[in-house]
Image: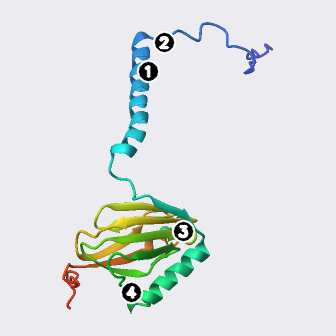
Amino acid sequence: MSALPVPETHTGLDSPAGVWWKPAHRAEKLWVGIAFGWCIVLFAMMPLWHLKGGQNPSGIRRRTDAAAFYKRTQEFIKQYQVGTDRGMPVVEPPPGSDVYLAGMTFQWTPILRLRQGAEYTLHISSLDVNHGFSLFPVNVNFQVVPGYDYGLRVTPTAAGDFRIICNEFCGIGHHTMVGRVIVLDSAGQEIARSGEAR
Ligand SMILES: [Cu+2]
């Protein structure tokens, strides 16, 4: 009876036997060089885009906390409320005023009625977790992080009935987190949504 050959045991502490490593081929070195150069270009674009990109928020940012921001939002609602829509307060602040919008699981409070061409300071914060402010159907996106009050200087350029979609997954009801911004035209008239009689 012949014994089976015992396979050679090997541990990771020993180098494998034989020639297992060869210097990189010229083409591979060239490729690494090109890839590294492109990395540097992209890296340099981050600060350049920040300085030249024109996509930066207007830069009013301060610390807050959920209780304080909620209280301020409620004061804002009390001051300028003009109605309700399915239980949600509808607020029409005068042009030039400070506007407060709170994101929370899973709603945006309140519904805003703004005037086309008027400037507002839109304060956004989250009362719980990260949310994403995404104005539909226009391409306006902003991260809403709890603990920070972001004051964005905004001027609505188009009248209409817009939706705020949460674009940052925030929990089980994330897909239902839809807010509303109504922009009145410069004469103060509300533009009817398509298919809606007024
Ligand atoms: Cu959300």
Provide the residue designation for mark 4.
90
* Separation of marks 1 and 3 at Cα, in angstroms: 42 Å
Provide the residue designation for mark 2.
24
- Which residue is located at x 55 percent, y 75 percent? 69
Total numbered labels: 4
Front label number (3 vs 4):
4
Going by the numbered disc 3, the residue's amino acid type is Gly
Q: Is residue 106 above or below residue 143?
A: below
> In the displayed image of the protein, which residue is found farthest to the front?
96
Q: Is residue 86 above or below residue 148?
A: below
- Residue 32's disc is 1
Front label number (2 vs 1):
1
Going by the numbered disc 1, the residue's amino acid type is Val
Q: Secondary structure at mark 3?
A: loop
Instruction: State which tag comes first along the sequence, 2 or 1.
Output: 2
Instruction: State which tag comes first along the sequence, 4 or 2.
Output: 2
Q: Secondary structure at mark 2?
A: loop
* In the image, the residue with mark 3 has its CB under 8 Å from the nearest atom of ligand 1: yes
Q: Is residue 162 visible?
A: yes
Provide the residue designation for mark 3.
171
Contact, CB < 8 Å: mark 2 with mark 1? yes
